[in-house]
Image: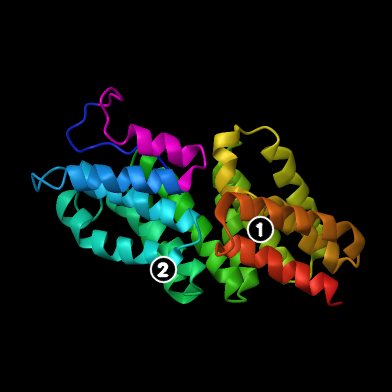
Amino acid sequence: MKLFRWRGRHEAGQTTNNPLAQATALYQAGRYAEAEAEARSVAAARSRPRDDTYAPLALGIAALAAGAQGRHADAVTTYDALLPVFGKTFGPEHPQTLKLRSDRAQALSSLARHTECEAECAAVARVAARGTGPDMLLIATAARNGQVYALTSLGRHPEAEALAREALAARRAPDRFTLVLRLGLARSLNGQDRHEEALVEAERADDLRRRLPQEQLRPETGAVELATATALLGLGRAGEARPLVAAARDACLAAFGPDHRRTAEAEALLGRIDGA
C-alpha cells in the first residue's frame, strides 16, 4: 500500500529527477508489470554506491507491484531481503522501514499467514503511533487496516470490528484509508452474520468510492462489490449478489490476474452462490 511519495534520504522534497517517478506513475496507473520492470531496472542501475537509498526503495516498489499481480510469495521474498537493508539504511523506526514492514505483513496475509500478519501489523501500528507527522499517521492507519483483515481471516470478528471502529473514529478524512477501514468493518460484521449492518457499511464504502480519484481506487478493485455481495448473500438475496460477484471477478482478473487473493475470493464466492 503506497502511503507517501518514495524519496531518497537526501532528496530535498523535490520531484524533479526523482529516479522512482516513472515506476511510481506506472504503479498508480495500474500497469503493475511495467512498474515492476522499471523499478527493478532502477534498482539494478543504482546498486552502486552502497549508500544509494533509491535502490532499496525501488525494490520496495517492485515487491508491491509483484503482489498486485498476484505473485504474493515473490513479494514476500523481496520484502524479507529488504528488511535488514531498510533497517540499516533508514533506521528501524523510520517511516520507510515501518511502511515496508506494513506492506510485507499484508503480503503475508495474502499467503494465508494471518497470524504473522496480525502480530506484525499490531507492532508496526504501536511504533508508528509513537511518532509524529502525517507519514506516521498514515502508516499506523494502514497497519491497523492490515490487522483488521487478518483478524477477520482468523475468525476473530468482534476484535476486528472493535479495531475497525476505533480506527474509523480517529480518521475523519474521506480518503482511501477510510474506504478500506469501512470495508474491513463490513467484513467483520458479515463474519458475525450481522448482514444488515454489513450492507449499510458496504453502501457507505460505495458512496465514498464514487467521490475518490481513480488512482486511489485501483488497489481496491472489486472489494466494494465483494463486501456488498457477501452481505446480500447472507440476507438470502443471492440473485442480487451474483452479478456483483461476477463483475468483481472479471475486474480483478483484468486488474490483478488469476492468482491475486481478491480474484480467488471472488471465484470462491461465485462458486458458493452457484453451488447453493
Q: Quadrant of the C terminus?
A: bottom right
Viewer-nearest residue: 260 or 238: 260
Real-space Cα separation, disc 1 to disc 2, in angstroms: 27 Å
In the displayed structure image, the side of residue 59 where residue 251 appears, left or right: right
In the rendered image of this protein, does residue 253 appear above or below residue 12? below
- Please state the horizontal and vertical placement of residue 122, each as a whole percent of the image: 42, 64
Residue shown at 41%/68% (left/top)? Answer: 73
Magenta region: which residues?
A: 13-32
Q: Residues within 10 Å of mark 2 (few under 14, many from 20)?
A: some
Task: Kindly identify which residue carries mark 2.
Answer: 73
Query: Taking 205 as reference, is 71 left or right?
Result: left
What residue is shown at x 53% (from left), y 56% (from top)? 145
Residue drawn at 59 percent across, 57 percent down: 164
Which residue has dot 1 on it? 185
Q: Is residue 2 visible?
A: no
Instruction: Please provide percent x and percent y for residue 188.
Output: 67, 65
Residue type indicated by callout 1: Leu
**Type of the residue with mark 2:** Ala
